Image (spheres, grey):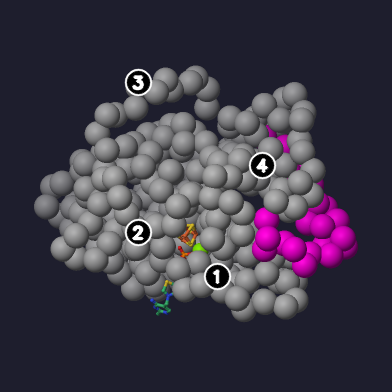
Amino acid sequence: MSGQTAILDYPEQEFILPGNRLCAGCGVTIAYRFILKALGKKTIICVPACCLTILHGIYPKTPIMATTVNNTFAGTASAASGFAAGLKATGREDWHVLAMAGDGGTFDMGLQSLSGAAERGENIIYVCYDNEAYMNTGSQRSSATPPGALTSTTPVTPKQQLKKDFMKIMEAHWLPYMAGVSSAYPGDVYKKFVKARDIGGTRFFHLAAPCPTGWWYPTKDTVKIGRMMVESCIFPLYEIEEGRLSLTGKSLSIARSGGKKPVDEYIALQGRFKKITPEQVAQFQKQVDKQWQALLARAGF
Ligand SMILES: Cc1ncc(C[n+]2csc(CCOP(=O)(O)OP(=O)(O)O)c2C)c(N)n1
Ligand code: SF4
Ligand SMILES: [Mg+2]
């Protein structure tokens, strides 16, 4: 994907009104603003319990200017499938269905219905925003939590297991479009959603959403932390179209010109890693290097 989008090229319409209940510095809102701008007003949103439901607020008040349904954890993709079918049956195929859930609601609890919808090729866009734990209920570990992180269910000894490679699971569904995006790069988010918007079928996004409350860093550092994830190749930016993988943005420039940073500076800035051992840091780096090499090979570098 090439070309820059200038600030003036983004739609002026805002779908998130000022003032909401999320923590200061929350990474979710930055990306969500640009996702909604890319999809436009003809969008129905399905959200399970998570921080995003807190952003949406309690009926009848909401800062979100879009039709939204709050569904069960297990049923995000099935609720979205139902809306896609209803829109088709009523001739409203110019509408988009956005299903958006956290890592707990996707990697763990919503996986079964997501897999079913993806296998059927439902006409939905599914976004997993990943803050690497069950944050809305006080930071319990999920299968997306990285090794070495403290959470409220790994409070003394940090999590030991590797983060689940969720994109591999989604790739097994032969989707027409998948992408890795980050709140720290909203322009990349916008462009990928504009591209995915009209493709049709099940499109899947994995969104890195840094969380100052659960990762224990100052609220002003959300974009910095998000950029460090990409610069150290912990969370590369890429898209997979019909199985073809291309790196985008900062990840493409690292692939072309180098400049990959080590993971230790990223780790050192967050309180959740304060009990990580040197062996775990080395294991973290090794895992990141392995996954980055695999992406480089697939992208033809
Ligand atoms: C069936 C069910 N189990 C548990 C809960 C409690 N609950 C609400 S939000 C949440 C955490 C969700 O985590 P995640 O999907 O990662 O989203 P985040 O809170 O991190 O944004 C949990 C466990 C619930 N609402 N419903
Ligand atoms: S807990 Fe984290 S993800 Fe949830 S609203 Fe606060 S900063 Fe955002
Ligand atoms: Mg989460």
Q: Which residue is mark 1?
A: 139
Residue 163, image quadrant:
bottom right
The one of 248 and 130 positioned closer to us in this rendering: 130
Real-space Cα distance between discs 2 and 3?
A: 28 Å
Chief secondary structure of the magenta portion = helix
Query: Can I make out residue 84 in this image?
Result: no
**How far apart, in angstroms, are the residues tagged by discs 4 and 1?**
22 Å
Q: Which mark is in front, 2 or 3? A: 2
Outermost left residue: 90
**Residue at horizontal 54 percent and vertical 45 percent from the top:** 220
Q: Are marks 1 and 2 in contact (CB under 8 Å)?
A: no
Secondary structure under tag 3 reads helix
Amino acid type, residue under disc 4 in the picture: Met
Single out the mark in the foreground, 1 or 2. Answer: 2
Is label 2 in a helix, a strand or a loop? loop
> Which mark is drawn over residue 8?
3
Examine the image and state in which quarter residue 211 appears.
bottom right
Marked residue nearer the N-terminal end (2 or 3): 3
Give the camera-side residue of 83 and 71. Answer: 71
Q: On the picture, is 58 further left or further right than 129?
A: left
Rendering coords of residue 26 (x, y %): 47, 52
Reading the chain from its start, which is encountered first: label 1 or label 2?
A: 2
Question: Considering only vertical position in the picture, is 218 above or below 57?
Answer: above
Which numbered disc covers residue 21?
A: 2
Q: What is the three-letter code of the residue carrying label 2?
A: Arg
Q: Which residues are magenta?
A: 270-299
- Asked if residue 279 lies in the magenta stretch, the reply is yes
Which residue is pictured at 77% across the width and 67% down the height?
275
Question: Which sits in the foreground, 285 or 12?
Answer: 12
Report which residue position mark 4 lands on.
Answer: 228
Q: Is residue 4 above or below residue 26?
A: above
**Which of the 4 quarters of the picture holds residue 172?**
bottom right
